[in-house]
Image: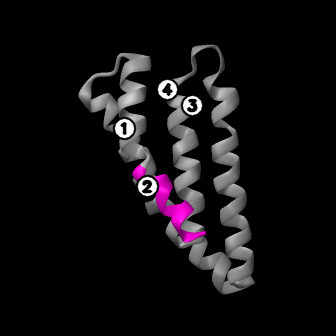
Amino acid sequence: LFFLWGAANSLNDVLIRQFSKAFALRDWEAGLVQSAFYIGYFFGGLPAAKVAHEYGYRAAVTVGLCLFSAGSLLFFPVSRGGGSYGGLLCCLYLIAFGLAFLE
């Protein structure tokens, strides 16, 4: 299970190349993929600790899996019809926010 959580981190480099092709991004715009992901980690840490402290680790893992799943599943509607780069970045943020709960 931990392998799958780590796989999300390693796929960011692949997403940068694919988003650059699909949206004709400049270098700084493509760098927003990594930024959105790690900002999600940054802002997810304290809420994750609060949930784990107040409700236990089982609740924190459940919330993390729900957030991770929601971010992953939202890729489908956001990417339809050419997609929205901002929407895809929000999905990545949500995935990383959920990963903060899982770790």
Q: Which residue is mark 4?
A: 85
Is the residue under label 2 in contact with that under label 3 (CB below 8 Å)?
no
The residue that label 1 is drawn on is 32
| Position of residue 10 measured from the top left corner of the image (x, y, whole percent) | 40, 52
Amino acid under disc 4? Tyr
Instruction: Name the residue located 54 percent from the left edge and 33 percent from the top edge.
Output: 88
Question: Which residue is the site of mark 2?
Answer: 9
Q: Image point 42% across, 27% down: which residue?
A: 19
Gap in angstroms between the C-alphas marked 3 and 2? 19 Å
Query: If you read the primary sequence from the N terminus, does the residue marked by circle 1 or circle 2 appear first?
Result: 2
Left or right, 24 with respect to 48, comes to: left
Answer above or below: position of 2 versus 11: below
Is residue 13 found left or right of 79 in the rendered image? left
Is the Cβ of the residue at disc 4 closer than 8 Å to that at disc 3?
yes
Residue 93 in picture, x, y percent from top left? 52, 47
Dot 2 or dot 4: first in sequence order is: 2
Q: CA distance from mark 2 to mark 4?
A: 19 Å
Residue depicted at 66% across the width and 20% down the height? 80
Task: Quarter of the image for the N terminus: give it.
Answer: bottom right
Q: Does the magenta portion include 4?
A: yes
The tag on residue 54 is none
Residue 78 inside the magenta-drawn segment: no
Q: CA distance from mark 1 to mark 2?
A: 14 Å
